[in-house]
Amino acid sequence: MSDKLKQIISKQAKQASELSIDHSEDIVQLVGFVIGEEEYAVPILSIQEIIKPISWTRVPQTPKYILGVFNLRGSVIPLIDLRTKFGLSPKKHNEETRFFVLKEGDDVAGFVIDRLTMALRISKKNIGPAPDTMAGDESMIDGVGKQADRILTILKVNKLLERDF
Amino acid sequence: MDEFQEILQDFLIESFELIEQLDQDLVELENTPEDLELLNGIFRVAHTIKGASSFLNFDVLTHLTHHMEDILNKARHGDIVLNAEIMDVVLESIDLMKALLYKIRDTSSDDGIDVAACVVRLDRITSGEGNAPASAAAPIVEEVLVQEEVSTPEEELDYDSMSDDDVEAEIQRLLSQRQDEDKAKRAAKIAAGESVPEAPPEPDAVEQEKKQEPKPATTVPVPVTPRAAPSRASREDEDDAKAAAPAKRAPAAVEQTIRVDVKRLDHLMNLIGELVLAKNRLIKINVDVEERYEGEEFLEELNQVVSIVSLVTTDLQIAVMKTRMLPIGKVFNKFPRMIRDLTRELNKKMELVLHGEETELDKSIVEEIGDPLVHIIRNSCDHGIEMPADRIAAGKSESGTVILKAYNEGNHIVIQIDDDGKGLDIEMLKRKSLEKGVITEKEADSMTDKEAFALIFKPGFSTAASVTSVSGRGVGMDVVKTNIEKLNGIIDIESEVGVGTSIKLKIPLTLAIIQALLVGVQEEHYAIPLASVLETVRISREEIYTVENRSVMRLRDDVLSLVHIGDIFEVERILDGSEHAYVVVLGLGASKLGLIVDTLVGQEEIVIKSLGDYLTGIEGIAGATIRGDGGVTLIVDVAALMHMAKSVKAKAMVEHSAGASKEKTKASDYTVMIVDDSKTDRMIMRKALEPLGVTLVEAGDGQEALNILKQGEKNFDAMLIDIEMPRMDGYTLASEIKKYNRYKNLPLIAVTSRTGKSDRMRGVESGMVEYITKPYSADYLSSVVQRNVNFKSEFL
């Protein structure tokens, strides 16, 4: 009995300490997703919503990675295929495919991702800078997040939403 | 300061409105100089602006209006008769007023515009000199006089020499004098005096405080009025009182209005747009529900609700659209003045007749339409109407007429500009265009009359022999075309040499919600603004000709150049339609183009939505709309499309060899389809062909085979087709396949147990190249296939 009590108490203490981390300023909340073999993440606050694939309309005279536009409750929003944009071969949409609707300021766009992983919290000290070869203003990579057994590439939302054609 | 800004804004809005009215009234007044009511009205306008501007310390403006007011006042009392010369000066002063108001709007101050010259001219008229016939003869001398007068305003100088205290005392004296007058009057009159007595002391006091130190002279204009002519001041006040009277006399003219920020209306319009989309969707769902639950009772109720919603939405849309509507008179109003000025400038005699000023159209369009109309009317006056002597020689009346009329035609408004001038000379137009290199000799020869008329809209074209200040720089009409096209409008010109020219502008009523023609190409749909669609025609392939590498067709007497929508929008064309195609004839401005589409879907009311920042500026796409099924359909930008059509190669209907020519490097590059409903038969054929190493695709019946072809994932080199199959037999399949351009040369081999001669004949008729009868040997089948796919022997 006392063992169990101890367990509970220690658990509570652990939770409390976790909570205290939550409130500290150095935590970044991200949502992770997979494209091809790699895991990427964007800040949770830049995500307007995540939806299952719906039909879209092709827009002519655009690069291949722009699939077209789709209707999100009355707004016409561009749809960008991140696989193609990252140089991977296109893949048929399946059960796990999602549209990530990202928003920054007035710019909104939908991005096709292969699979959603999870929402996660990473403390800032676990985020390293982008590799030197990829750093700079032009790069889409904001940094690299390390967590337990994996590495996440954190993307710059403003770069994703920037028209580059 | 904010409060001041607010007052300033109101002042500007009011003043601009008043001045617009003033312009028009004055021109009218010139024709009917004895119309006292009109004159009173004009006087009141000038007076109001004067009062307000003095309150806001716009001294230059006050100074100017004050002198103008003097003339009008004299005219009102019959002391002078307004003739053209006086009118010129008055109109000039109004122009100056406008310039000042613009200046105030932009800089919040009215410094920097010199009104002295104009004021002196005004004064001269007031003092009677202006009536002297020789007035035009010695402008320079008078100019000198002007300066003198300005620099020595008798009593005004006194103020300059006075000390501040003296000035204050003088002002005080004037104020009390005026207040006494007012008091006396107030006592005398009970009615309509309210605003008059209290208002003046305050502004004057404020003014006086502010001004004393920096520039004492500026206080002058305000107190001058009561002191210099106290008797007139009282007259003015009487007029103020009178002002209320005419307004009551014509109660119909008083409209109940609220000023609403345009942004709010735009927002409302956006919301209505959403509602229209929802309505479209509801109607579609209703149709689906009706099909599924036919005969159910609740359908009746649902139907009612849907039709009410749709009815109310439509009404609401019209109502909101109407709130944004302005009478086109707002634009037309400035033309009488313009014509009057042009008459004097060009030494021609012209009359402007306006019709349909009350015709309404969307605010945004009213704003855009002004410039094009100015150019067209100037053009008509300058190039169209002849000199009076020429007109008489031609047996016409001395004075030319320009008729400007507006009327509704369906969902469009038509603005028509007619003149009875010399008309457009086609030969002259062509010659000029050739000289300027606007067109080539060949084009000139093949040109229709309409096309020749449209030359006046080409950039760099001007037919005026000499460049006048009015027109002839070859810029104007080009602008007309661009602006009208921006509004999705159409320009139509008719002209007869010696009789006159008529230019028609056909413009949609609104820009946010439009009627569109939906067309299909392959699996995609596009919306074309109906305003730009002249007609649609169904043609067969044989009607398409190629001229100079461009596809064209004959449309009645015209030759219409054609372009396939798929070539413009990079649509992958897997199936190239049947023998027939639909051509949507687009008209924009004066040019036409035939757009080939696969299907016509229908007409629909669509709401224009932007594609967002990320996708702005995509050539050929004006925006998008959301359809009843929730999907997005792109809206074609007809002007851009016409431009793009020029650079698209003439492959409108030319057959594609569709990748079949791809080099074969190994046996499996050959693909053969086996179509048979019997699995055993398919297996036998497979066994016979497998040794070759070719890729084999199987289909259980004609329908399935056709679907595989439609998907277009593979390029087939031959097909083995059984004749008797369920769903679709071999003959039907063969003739279906032959309908597609891409498969025209695909060898179809019949494999059947039917051996009759007539069966063979049918096979040939439906497009089969070989006829193999069952049973057959594996070697025979293999050799037939090899022969038909041009199998390279090195793969064996």
Image (tube, coloured by chain):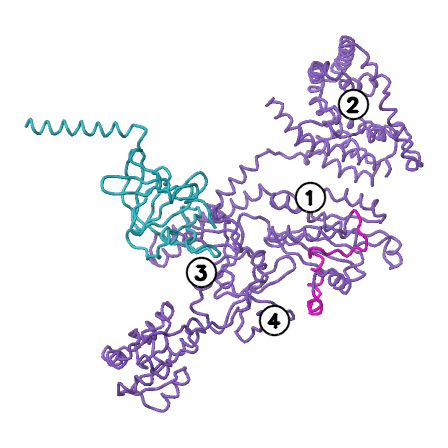
Q: Position of residue B8 (x, y in %)?
A: 65, 26
**Of the residues under marks 1 and 3, which one precedes in the sequence?**
1
Q: Quadrant of residue B437?
A: bottom right
Q: Position of residue B202 (x, y in %)?
A: 69, 15
| Part of the protein shown in magenta | B440-469
Left or right of B239 in this view: B572: left
Question: Marks 2 and 4: CB-CB under 8 Å?
Answer: no
Q: Secondary structure at mark 1?
A: helix
Give the chain ID for the purple colour: B
Q: Position of residue A85 (x, y in %)?
A: 39, 52
Classify mark 3: residues with Cα within 10 Å, few (<14), some (14-19) or many (20+): some
1 and 3 marks on the same chain = yes
Q: Amino acid at mark 1?
A: Val
State which chain disc 2 sits on: B
Tell me which residue sits at (31%, 33%) in the image: A124
**Of the residues under marks 4 and 3, which one precedes in the sequence?**
3
Note whether residue B693 is visible. Answer: yes
Mark 2 — residue?
B236
Note whether residue B312 is visible. Answer: no
Residue B331 is marked as: 1
Q: Amino acid at mark 4?
A: Glu
State which chain disc 1 sits on: B
Of the residues tagged 1 and 4, which is closer to the observer?
Answer: 4
Looking at the rendering, in which quadrant would you find the C terminus of chain B?
bottom left
Q: Secondary structure at mark 4?
A: loop
Image colour assigned to chain A: cyan
Classify mark 1: residues with Cα within 10 Å, few (<14), some (14-19) or many (20+): some
Whole-angstrom CA distance, mark 1 to mark 4, is: 45 Å
